Image (cartoon, rainbow, N blue to C red):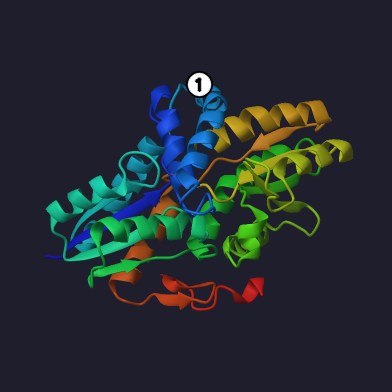
Amino acid sequence: MSRIAVVLFNLGGPDSPAAVLPFLRNLFRDPAILRVPALVRPFLAELIARGRAPVAREIYGRIGGRSPILPQTEAQARALERSLADAGEVRAFIAMRYWHPRARETAAAVRAFAPTQIVLLPLYPQFSTTTTESSFEEWHRVYGHNANTVAIGCYPREDWFVRAYAACIAPVLADACRHGAPRVLFSAHGLPQKIADAGDPYTRHVEQSVAAIARALGLSEGTWVTTYQSRVGRLEWVKPSTEDEVKRAGADRVPLVLAPISFVSEHSETLVELDIELRETAQHAGVPAYFRAPTVSAADTFIAGLADLVRTALKGELRGCPLHADHKCPRPACAKEAA
């Protein structure tokens, strides 16, 4: 019987107030995040991490002092194992990029399992050098390159992905319609503009996701906007910002539905930034009604889609994506709609 290891990648988050500073150190020491000369990166990372830590502790303090991302990812991992029970002896492992369990400890667990095949599966639907590529590079540093390993690069507009997100948004949209004709803000995590300008495909993948989900929901042009949140630092970030679009909705006096589009589990960006901070911004801006759709988390459609994606990978049927040719994704021409 085949022994299959599926490695789920995510950013991770601090599991206690004491973990906030080391978590931020790990984040800003990543050359994919802080793109400065290697000689100065540790010093600058420490400076930024220490400056950001008090704000981050306050943010996590509003949701119990820790990130919920690990237990939610564990739930996704166990659900994926159940969905793949027909594929052999399948075990799903978790490799967080900036907090435990990190790639090194996960690699040791995978070696102990001694799989015949390994599938690297990012829980980042849209590919970015700052997320998927960074996670893959760390994995290969600690595990090495293995002929029995296949890496899935992205799935920004797979049918199951679109249906899973639409199912999360549709009932919330119906509630919002009772307050008038709502505007939907599809909010993705932001990215510095200079990284996008350097060829990172992330924003084009986000646009593909949003366009497909808007079609599935039957949204007409002008009733939805792709926005970006979670800006930090002084660099220019991709626009429009979610905050600016919330304020514009207030000026237009339209109800809002906030739909997180690049997050597959709840964490500080959804539970604090969207549910608390931007809700307060909406109230002050005069938005007549504010609703937030949940993330897909361990929804049956999402997990079943991930399982089918793993099966496709195991059969060797993934094709290269022109937006990130070094990795694999399920559609051979996922760039065409964004061209």
User: SS class of the residue under badge 1?
Assistant: helix
Q: Could you say which is closer to the camera, residue 301 or residue 150?
A: 150
> Looking at the image, is 13 positioned above or below residue 208?
above
Q: Could you say which is closer to the camera, residue 329 or residue 167?
A: 329
- The residue that appears at 50% across and 21% down in the rendered structure is 61
> Looking at the image, is 212 positioned above or below residue 44?
below
> Callout 1 environment at 10 Å: few (<14), some (14 to 19), or many (20+)?
some
Residue 13: which quarter of the image?
top left
Q: Could you say which is closer to the camera, residue 281 or residue 304?
A: 281
Q: Could you say which is closer to the camera, residue 176 or residue 145?
A: 145
Side (left or right) of 176 relative to 202: right
Residue 91 placed where, x, y %? 22, 52
Residue 90 placed where, x, y %? 21, 56
Residue 148 placed where, x, y %? 22, 70
Q: Quadrant of the N terminus?
A: bottom left
> Looking at the image, is 197 positioned above or below residue 268?
below
Side (left or right) of 332 relative to 194: left
Which residue matches tag 1? 61
Q: Residue furthest front?
A: 39
Looking at the rendered structure, the number of numbered marks drawn on it comes to: 1
- The residue that appears at 55% across and 40% down in the rendered structure is 294
Q: Is residue 323 visible?
A: yes
Q: Quadrant of the C terminus?
A: bottom right
Side (left or right) of 102 relative to 194: left
- The residue that appears at 88% across and 37% down in the rendered structure is 251
Name the amino acid type tagged 1. Gly
